[in-house]
Amino acid sequence: MLRIVGGTWGGRRIQTPPGRHTRPTPERVREALFSRLAHLDAVAGAHVLDLYAGSGALGIEALSRGAAHVTFVESHGRTAGLVRRNLSGLDAPAAQWAVTVAKAEPFLRTARPAVPWSLVLMDPPYAGEEYARVLPLLATLPVVATGALIAVEAAAGAALPLPAGLEQSRVDRYGDTQVILLSKQALSAPAPGAEQP
């Protein structure tokens, strides 16, 4: 069980998936992250993408604090079902959330949100190449709004492969976890007459 830290559902508890294929974000990390995001006025009214949703704790924390809508993306079907049950147990209005069973990269390539996401919460498995595959998509695809904030969890000390279009604004370390805050910049258009790749 995880406790929701703040907002409308502060103090309520949600279920976490059994086994080791998910790694829920610790309470103190969620509290610090959302305090930072609230200070930046990045949560209330936001359209949020929770990639690698796991239990849904990050996206649910955003809804609890006034996000307009959260899209949860989880590759494991049973875990996605748990996210739905957690949201139903909180009586979260159905119009404010959607849960999709998909891997992050193909989801981003085919997604057509009604409103571009202004906040992305990204907590992939630390092992693997998810950062290198997904960050360039967040930097370039129009499904993520220019000016959007992207909060990325990674192992402490890990260096992210930062693509053009994403600017690192802050890094906070909590034990063996670090949270890296990125912002999406407008990509400069090629000069007139410039050769296209």
Image (cartoon, helix red, strand yellow):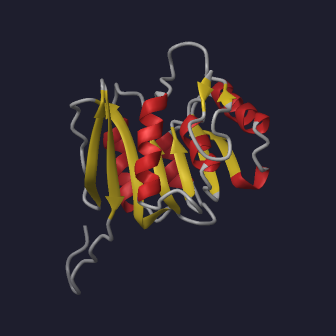
Most distant residue in the top direction = 19
> Is 57 above or below relative to 36?
above
Q: Position of residue 27 (x, y in %)?
A: 49, 30
Which residue is at the front of the view, 167 or 2? 2
Residue at the (75%, 38%) spot, across then down: 90
What residue is drawn where x is 75% and y is 45%?
92
Image height of 176 relative to 163, above or below: above
Asked which quadrant contains residue 81, the reply is top right
Figure check: 67 above or below 8: below
Residue that appears at 61% across and 20% down: 17
Residue 61, position in %: x, y?
A: 58, 42
Q: Position of residue 114 (x, y in %)?
A: 63, 65
Q: Quadrant of the C terminus?
A: bottom left
The answer to which quarter of the image holds residue 139 is bottom left
Q: Quadrant of residue 13?
A: top right
- Res. 17 visible in picture: yes
Is residue 129 at least partly visible in the picture? no
Count of numbered labels shown in the rendering = 0
> Could you tell me which quadrant the N terminus lies in?
top right
Q: Residue furthest bottom?
A: 192
| Lateral position of residue 118 relative to residue 164, left or right | right
Q: Decide if residue 25 is on the left or right side of residue 134.
A: right
Give x and y (percent) for residue 108: 50, 51
For the point 26% across and 44% down, the residue is 171
